Amino acid sequence: MTDTSAATTGRTPMPVLFVPHGAGPCFFMDWNPVNTWNRLASFLKGVADTLPARPNAIVLVSGHWLESSFSVTGGTNPGLIYDYHGFPPHTYELAYPAQGSPGLAERITHLLKQAGIDSQMDTERGFDHGMFIPLKLMFPGADIPVVQLSLHQNLNPRVHLEAGKALASLREEGVLIIGSGMSFHNMRGFGDARFGQPSDAFDSWLTTAVESESAQRDALLEHWEQAPHARDCHPHGGEEHLLPLLVAAGAGGLSAGRRVYSERVMETTQSAFRFG
């Protein structure tokens, strides 16, 4: 890993992001209607220009990796995991040759363990599509080291908030922390107009929660199941696409949160959020 320990001294800390990563390799194939994912693609392509500086490294939390304890990719050159099914053949040839960062991975496990959170390095695992699909748009040069962080399979909101808090100091070192998931993720609901109003209600609640003062934000997000239509938007046991937002909120610390993108796509509302 590039030495980031003093690289951003005196500079603005990196923000923390939660971004929707779309449906499989949706940005790199034909879709019907053809413009279904255009606005989200444009948002992702513009993210780098909103940052205070070029990141020294990226820590990405994907909704597509769950383990019995938090795990981080520890390889130098992780391969790609094409963990989507039934898409055109060319989407299984997409490339994103970003380097890993064993040094940063070790630092992450150390920070988590300091916070009393079990964690481990996985030197064999590659990058799943929750990582390489959005990053191909956000940082197409694949020239920033990336470490991917798993979720905990217990799906406990408090645990994921605390994991994010443990990593917050990385922001001072020029590390960009990204939660990659979906603010609405019910496979039965995509394309079904009956889910439009429930997704709007949940998204409105989620935006209010994110934009609340940090202590209230944490309390609301910890009890996200109490939000209107929460389980219509994230079915029981399937909230893995929402939990990266909780890690991001934890890493956001005292930084104000705000919604930075929102639209109706496939009959449901999707949003992105930023802290700092």
Image (cartoon, grey):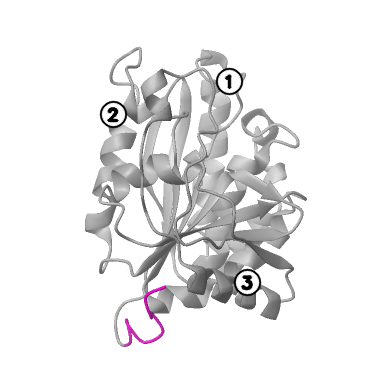
Residue beneath disc 1:
189
Q: Is residue 4 magenta?
A: yes
Amino acid found under the numbered disc labelled 2: Asn
- Mark linked to residue 109: 3
Q: Is 220 placed left or right of 91 in the picture?
A: right
Q: Position of residue 10 (x, y in %)?
A: 30, 87
- Depth check: give the residue in front, 155 or 249: 155
Q: Which residue ends up furthest to the left in the rendered image?
A: 49
Depicted 165 relative to depicted 135: above or below: below
Q: Identity of the amino acid at label 1?
A: Gly
Q: Which numbered disc, 3 or 2, marks the residue that appears first in the sequence?
A: 2
214 horizontally vs 261: left or right: right
User: Where is residue 179 drawn, in percent x and y?
Assistant: 50, 52
Total of numbered circles in the picture? 3
- Specify the quadrant that holds the C terminus: bottom left
Marked residue nearer the N-terminal end (1 or 3) = 3
The amino acid sitting under disc 3 is Thr
What's drawn in magenta, residue-wise? 1-9
Q: Main secondary structure of the magenta part?
A: loop
The picture places residue 216, in percent across and down from the top left corner, at: 61, 63
Look at mark 2 in the image and give the residue it sits on.
38
Viewer-closest of 116 and 93: 93
- Badge 3 marks a residue whose secondary structure is helix
Residue at mark 2 to residue at mark 1: CA–CA distance: 20 Å
